Every structure is written in C-alpha cells, then in structure tokens.
Image (tube, rainbow, N blue to C red):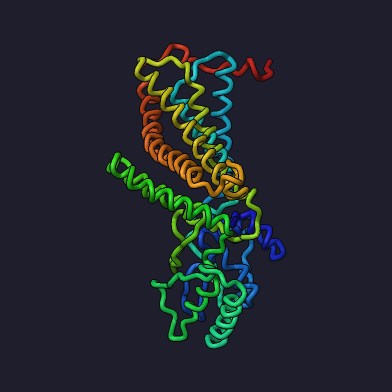
Amino acid sequence: MSRPSDMLCLCSEYGWTMSHGYFIQMGGFMLYNKEKLSRVLYPHELDNLIGNGLIVMPQITEEEIQDRSKSDGLSKALVVIHTTWFICQCIARRLQGLIITELELVTLAFAALNGVMYMFWWFKPLDVQTTVRVDLLGDRNDISGRIHDIRSSELDLTQTPGSISETRLDDVTVGPEGIEMELENLIPSSEMRPHQRIIISKFRELFFSVCWLIGILFLWPLIGMVAVLARIPDIIYNSTHTSRAEGVPTFYTSYKFFPEKPLGEDLVALNFLPFVGILFGAIHCAGWNFSFPSLFETYIWRLSSALITCVPLMILLLEIYCGLQVWFGDNFFVPKSLVDNFLVRIIQDFLLISIVVITALVLLYYIVARLALLVVAFTTLRDLPPGALAAVEWTSFLPHI
C-alpha cells in the first residue's frame, strides 16, 4: 500500500519525510521532458524511474514543502486546543451531572473525527499551489531506446496480462518520438497482487449482478448509491487512473506501491476506517436516554444512532469475509470436499450477494440518518431543560485559593 509511511520507508536514504510522502500523493512533482511539461509523477512510478536511471531523486526539503503549505504550527495548535477544550467541557459536564444537549453530543462526535484526521494528516501540506519540477534524463532518442529495452525485458519476465499499463496520455502531446507514451508503457499502473485482483473482480461481479435487482426494486433512490458502490474497489485498490498534466484526481491515493507487502497489513488498514465510523456512531448512541421534546424525536434519534453505528459494522464484517476468503481460499467456510459442490457455491454466492444488497440499501438510509441527527440536534434547542444552561464549576476540579 502506498501510504506516506511506505514512501518514508523507501526514501529515507534520500532524506525524505512523511511530508514528502503526502506531497507526491497530492501531485506535487511534475515530469518535464526538456522544457515541455509532461504530466504528474505518480508515487508508484518513482521507484521504477529512479531504478532505470530516467530521473534523479527530487531534491526538496521538508521545510520547503511546509513553506508552500497554507497551514502552520500555530493554526494547528489553535484547532487542537479548541477541540480539546470542548471535549474537556463535555467530560466535566458529565462528571458534575449536568445535562449535555444533543447538539453538543453531535459536535463531540465530529470533534472525535477531527482528532483522527489531525492524527493522520498532521504532516500533510495544506492547499499547496506550486509543484516541483522533475526532469527526464538524456536526449529523446536515448530515453526512448532505454525505455523500449526495459519494457521488452519486463514483458519477457512477467508474461502476465495487464502487467503493463495501457494508460494513454490524451491531454499531452510530447513530440514525434513518443517518449511519453513509451514512459507510460514502462510504468505498470496496475501493480496489484493476485488477491487484490480477485477482490476487485469479486466486487465488480457482485455489484453488477445486484444492479439489475436493485434497479427494479429501488431504481431512482438507489441509482446514485449503486454507482458509488461500484467504484469503491477502484477507489480502494486504485486499479485504474488517468494520467493528467494538471494534477491528480480529488480522491486519488496510490495503493499499489508495494505489491510484495503482506495481506495482513492491507486488512488492518481497510478495517480501521469502519472502526472510526463505529466510534462516530457510538458517541451518538450515548444520547440514547436523553430527554427529547417529543416521542417522535426520541425514536428518530435512537433509530438514526443505531443505524450509523451498525452500517460501518456491516462493512467491517464484509471486508473481513472477503479478506478471509482470499487468504484461506474458497474452502474457508466449508470442507474441502464440498468446495466444488454446485449447491454449496450457490449458497455461498447467495449469502455474499445478500450481504452486498443489504449493505447497499442501508448505505442509502445512512445518509438520511446523518441528516436526521443534525435536524433533531437543532430542533431540540426549542425546549431545553433548565440544567442544560448551567455552567461547569471548574473550581471543583482545579486547585484554588
């Protein structure tokens, strides 16, 4: 997985830091052929191009990257202090038996997400507007010949379909020698391990199989949701991307930088996000027994809180199921003697399709539940109990004279 930490491990010998890893994933390095802009340098291309002598390691310090960032230590410190102060207020109100309003609870949940985001993005540059130039080495004929030789040797060694990128550079014209097209063919854009290809193919087959059923039952409400779900495997594993001269896509992340990394690390990374969603929902569930102005708002809050907690749990179980099936093979849930049994395989596929269909349906209601919680949090302000306006007596916590 091409996380910034992976980039740090690979490039530590060049003095790279976590900020460099984020910077290259943001499209901060641009390839130039002579004086002509080519396109973005993607993370998974860096090792190949350096190893083949086509570029030199980009020379930029962490201080220079952070200087381009629109954020600094002071702004980050202010956000952390403000968020921490609010969390302390909520904890203190609970310890003193004071009422916490629904709006404060919703804000507390977002504060938790804010903390997770800052933990992972602390070294990420913010809103960088300028890029770093990386020049291709040698003249055009020399580069084209070396790329052709390397590409031929890779084809002879791998002999695997799809191991060489077929990405076209429609937005960039680089001259008659076609150096950039050769460069694209040198860089594998789908360096996925076999288990990743299996997971993507399984997801695609399942999603396109259930699209017909979902389209008949819930065509208009779910048409947008199914389109998003069908793209989830590509977003997760980044199996395809279009090279662009101006920058990387909004949700781009290079997942396939280290194809030799063990599957366990992939599962840990993928399963962490549902845990964040479960934490977010669990904070809302803390208001299960809060006092609401009406019974209707009570039911809406409880149902929505339970829903946004259970949906990430369902996604987590689905990821674990797919991961275990890839790890142990198709005979993980059934005896090996029954693996090829037609009925058993039908039951397995039916169960998995059922999980996917239910997840697709529930994801639609997840959006509605999130909106409902926000609405209820504001509507309850019309009838606050007297204790909600009481202030925290900090003298009961802090030493004083």
Where residue 231 appears, x then y in whole percent? 42, 52
Residue found at x 57% / y 42%? 320
Q: Nearer the viewer, residue 376 or 213?
A: 213
From where the camera sits, is residue 68 visible?
Answer: no
- When asked about the image quadrant of residue 386, the answer is top left
**Relative height, residue 138 to residue 98 (above, below):** below
Q: Give the answer, above or below, for where 359 lies relative to 257.
A: above
Q: Position of residue 194 (x, y in %)?
A: 57, 59
Residue occupying the point 59% across, 17% down: 95
Which of the 4 image quarters holds residue 249? bottom left
Q: Is residue 92 left or right of residue 201?
A: right
- Out of 351 and 360, give the one closest to the viewer: 351
* Residue 13, placed above or below residue 87: below
Q: Is residue 370 visible?
A: yes
x, y percent for residue 373: 40, 28
Give the position of the C terminus as an image quadrant: top right
Residue 281 point in image, percent of width and height: 49, 30
On-image quarter of the N terminus? bottom right
Q: Nearer the viewer, residue 353 or 115?
A: 353
Q: Looking at the image, which residue is at 52% across and 52% down? A: 199
Residue 293 location, quadrant: top left
Count of marks placed on residues:
0
The single residue placed furthest to the top in the displayed view is 386
